[in-house]
Amino acid sequence: MALLTILLCLILLVLLVSWAKVNPFLAFLLVSVVAGLLLGIPAEKVTASVQKGMGDTMGSLIIIICLGAMLGKLIATSGAAQKIAGVLVNASGKKNMQWALVLAGFVVGIPLFYGIGFVLVVPLIFSIAYKYKINAVYIGLPMLAALSVTHGFLPPHPSPTALVNQFHANMGVTLVYGLIIAIPTIIIAGPLYARTLKNIHSEPLATFRPADIADEDLPNAFNSFFSALLPVVLLMLTTLYPHLNIQSPTLNKWMAFIGDPAIVMLISLIYATFSLGLSRGKKMGALSSIYVEALKDIAIILLIIAGSGAFKQVLVDSGVSTQIAAQLQTLNMHPLVMGWVIAAIIRISLGSSTVAGLTAAAIVAPIIGTQHVDPNLMVLSIGAGSLVLSHVNDSGFWMYKEYFNLSIKDTFRSWSAMETLVAILGLGGVMLLNLFIHR
């Protein structure tokens, strides 16, 4: 009966978001309350359960996600992202333009949230397509594939960051595993798949070609690359540090402090504030305005994550999470595949990759400890599943269609197929890594 209740609540969540067009945060909140009451939590304790779930989830995430948003917004508005893309494109030449854009999308996609990254790189794609008379889909889709992979696989993006927290995974290890899987996934789903799309005609709308920042107003190349990649560098260094077996308690304590994801993001933002802001003549007041705008951009994402935490806590407090774990263990399916499938089903139903990943995490979390699943790989498996088959209920589908001025058929053939390839290849990479790690 409890499992049937959970199924009905998930169906209610799907209907509220996709059919009734209810805001996902409100939908999560309503479904969490309904689930708590139906699962037998005393009425006077339901709100306490919801509040605890929201508080526990946001407590360790809000710093990372907010600082990451500020850093990404600064990199975009300062021209650092434009400089990174320009350097890579100029170095590649017309023959390798597609690969240069993929690399640019990957580099700027790490610090930038997906929506910001999409709006930022599309004008670059269009300007190159017009300048060199190259098919916009052929060079643009691989760049967007890189953005999609970083969004689904790599911290400090909201969904993988939240999943790391829910599964008690290691942020640095997840990042390293994610990078290992991301590179071949981007290559296959990006440049290689795009070779089959050369006959898709695209006439990007002139409306979406805003003027670039003048070259003389851009930061230098080293400053741009280093500011954008500093979080990755710090996380990777502090992840590798314990393997050096350095016998210095004081140094070890400081490295553990610096390696905390919140401190990594704080250091990175402080550095970028000086390198991309104050040292280039910007006033602190102007930078603060950029940071406020960044927080506005992610406010709804934070609320959705909080709502998913409420749903997870209701499952825990009602005791049904242990029943779910017991039932899932009877299925003849690898836990990593199971996580992918659950996330994929919710993604196809709801359209939102973030909601799909977080909802799947709440369902799968109980089996992490009981089946000895690597939590870092579970983060990546669910992240991959949450990207599958973007279609008409996903805002990204319509952004791509309208920006590239394509038919529904060609949007499915290019965008939806690319996202599905990313999801399938991501799962394949996770399973291969699992073989090597636990052989």
Image: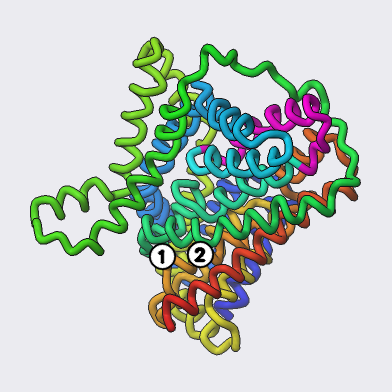
* Amino acid type of the residue tagged 1 in the rendering: Phe
Q: Is residue 219 above or below residue 115?
A: above
Question: Label 1, on which residue?
Answer: 167
* Amino acid type of the residue tagged 2 in the rendering: Ala
Q: Residue at x 42, y 76 (%)?
A: 437
Question: Which quadrant of the rendered structure holds the C terminus?
Answer: bottom left
Please state if 359 lies on the left or on the right of 97 as rendered. Answer: left
Residue 170, image x and y in percent?
Answer: 36, 60
Secondary structure at badge 2 equals helix
Question: Label 2, on which residue?
Answer: 361
Q: Which of 386/182 is in front?
A: 182
Task: Tell me the tag on residue 124.
Answer: none
Q: Residue at x 58, y 34 (%)?
A: 88
- The image quadrant of residue 313 is bottom left
Earlier in the chain: of badge 1 and badge 2, it is 1
Q: Is residue 119 covered in magenta?
A: yes
Q: Which residue is drawn at 54% across and 26% down?
A: 83
C-alpha separation, residue under disc 1 versus residue under disc 2: 8 Å
Residue 132, image x and y in percent?
Answer: 79, 29
Residue 16, image x and y in percent?
Answer: 68, 53
Q: Is the magenta stretch mostly helix, strand or loop?
A: helix
State the extent of the magenta-drawn residues as a range. 112-138
- Colour approach in the figure: rainbow
Q: Residues within 10 Å of mark 2 (few under 14, many from 20)?
A: many
